[in-house]
Image (spheres, rainbow, N blue to C red):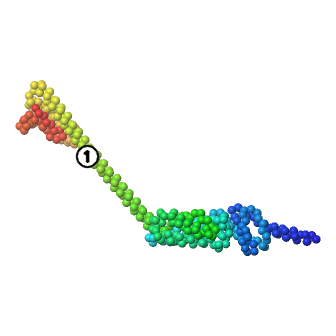
Amino acid sequence: MLIWLSVPLLITIVFLFTGIYIVPQQNVFIIERFGKYHKMSGAGIHLKIPVVDRIATKVSMRVMQLNETVNTKTKDNVFCNINVAVQYKVDPNNIAASFYELSNPEMQIRAYVEDNIRNALPAITLDDAFVQKDQIARDVQNTLKSSMDNFGFVIINTLITDIDPDAAVKNAMNSINESQRRKEAARELAEADKITVVVKAEAEAEQARLHGEGIANQRKAIIDGLSQSLQELKSAEMTETEVMSIILTEQYLDVLSSLSGSPNTKVLMLPSNIDGSDQMRNAMISSLESSAAGTLAGSGPGDIELKL
């Protein structure tokens, strides 16, 4: 009697263990009955009929990412590897199609990616590929959306993560860029040297102008001083010869003083007697009187002109 009672209990326990199933969060189970689609079960605890019902597949509703590398060439015949990342998920409204329509959805997505990349890249140069990579990614995404919607997949985003040309091509591009940078640096250095030369020339011109003005002002001050001294000596009722004698003697002594104080002066030859100095002074006075009556003139930085 106990055996007959235990058989139904055992069947019930087996039924419960084989008929009860739990679906995790962000997952959907597709249930088939006698090999035919029956229903979908969301997250939670569910019951199915053993032998009659079975779990056909477990579908994840999370976002998935497929990474694909496509080898192709550009318009300028540069071979490169294009790394593409496709983010997608199962359409909540078309879960059954994602399982029954495609046997390998990842392979289908890879095929569409490769086809679009190999159609787009040969029409543009390598430089344009770097500039237009976002546009190429959008074109791939639009193609995938229109194609995969019918199979129960939603394309969330498509990214071109890297464009990797051949190593020799990258080295050549780096060399070209380095050469352009060097040319730009050379132009900047030449421009800086030009500015330095111009500024230096302007400074030298300004220095020469100021030096000339200084000499002119010096000469004017000397002339003004001599003129004033001349007027004072004449007011003392001295003759013109006496006045010129005094002025020449004063200039002569000033020259001797400057020569003796110069570091470049080694030997200075002077008359050994006073008569020699008198003869020199008288000769200069006679020369001035004969060349320009009433005019006293000198040469060099201290040009002097006196009108008596």
Q: Locate residue 267: give its quadrant.
A: top left
Task: Give whichever of 170, 75 is nearer the camera.
Answer: 75
Residue type, numbered disc 1: Ala
Residue at 8% x, 34% y is: 294
The vertical placement of 235 against 294, above or below, is above
278 up-or-down from 35: above or below: above
* Location of residue 177 in the rendering, given as x and y in whole percent from the top left corner: 42, 62
Q: In the displayed structure, does residue 295 sit left or right of residue 25?
A: left
| Residue 136 seen in this snapshot | yes
The percent position of residue 303, horizontal first and vertical second, equals: 16, 38
| The C terminus: image quadrant | top left
Residue 205 position, x and y percent, is 26, 46
Query: Mark 1 falls on what kind of element?
Result: helix
Farthest left residue in view: 290
Q: Which residue is mark 1?
A: 205
Let me know if residue 67 appears in the view: no
- The residue depicted at 73 percent of the width and 70 percent of the height is 38
- Circle 1 Cα neighbour tier, 10 Å, few/some/many (<14 / 14–19 / ≥20): few
Taking the image as shown, residue 199 lies to the left or right of residue 251, namely right
> Height in image: 226 above or below 121?
above
> Residue lying furthest right in this view?
1
Determine which quarter of the picture holds residue 150: bottom right
Q: Residue at x 60, y 72 (%)?
A: 107
